[in-house]
Amino acid sequence: MTTTTVATGKVTQVHHRVSIDLDTPQPFTDLVGRTRKVYALHIDYALSPIADRADIVVEYKDSAALVPPVADIPDWMQTFIDQHKPNGPALTLT
């Protein structure tokens, strides 16, 4: 006779990563006031019952940088963040 052990658990956080190559480079001004062209975005969404967040990395022509949470997010970037945020009953955490 074989005994099967059933494991149980609770999902506490869901991660969803999106990488976007921009058709046309867009301007982004960092916290020190430098404006550079962004060629790609990498958005890492973390969804939990406590809080949802999006960590954003911008890719420039010769480097990449994390966008700090206190940075001003331009409209073009916010549109991508909103468009690709996961939603729906499958991602509702309790």
Image (cartoon, rainbow, N blue to C red):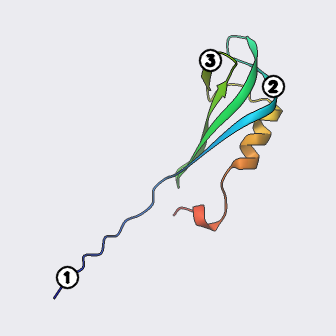
Q: Nearer the viewer, residue 77 or 38?
A: 38
The kind of secondary structure element at disc 2 is: strand
Q: Which residue is mark 2?
A: 26
- The x and y percentages for residue 63 are 62, 17
- The x and y percentages for residue 3 are 20, 82
The kind of secondary structure element at disc 3 is: loop
Q: Which residue is mark 1?
A: 3
Identify residue type, mark 2.
Gln
Label 1: how many residues lie within 10 Å, few (<14), some (14-19) or many (20+)?
few
The kind of secondary structure element at disc 1 is: loop
* Mark 1 and mark 3 residues within 8 Å of each other at the beta carbon: no
Identify residue type, mark 3.
Ser
* Mark 1 and mark 2 residues within 8 Å of each other at the beta carbon: no
Q: Which residue is mark 3?
A: 63
- Residue at the location (73% across, 34% down)? 21
Left or right relative to 15: residue 75: right
Q: Residue 39 is drawn in which quadrant?
A: top right
Q: Earlier in the sequence, mark 2 or mark 3?
A: 2
Q: Between marks 1 and 3, how big is the CA–CA gap? A: 55 Å
Above or below for 78 versus 83: above
- The x and y percentages for residue 45 are 59, 45
Q: Residue 92 is drawn in which quadrant?
A: bottom right
Q: Residue furthest bottom?
A: 1
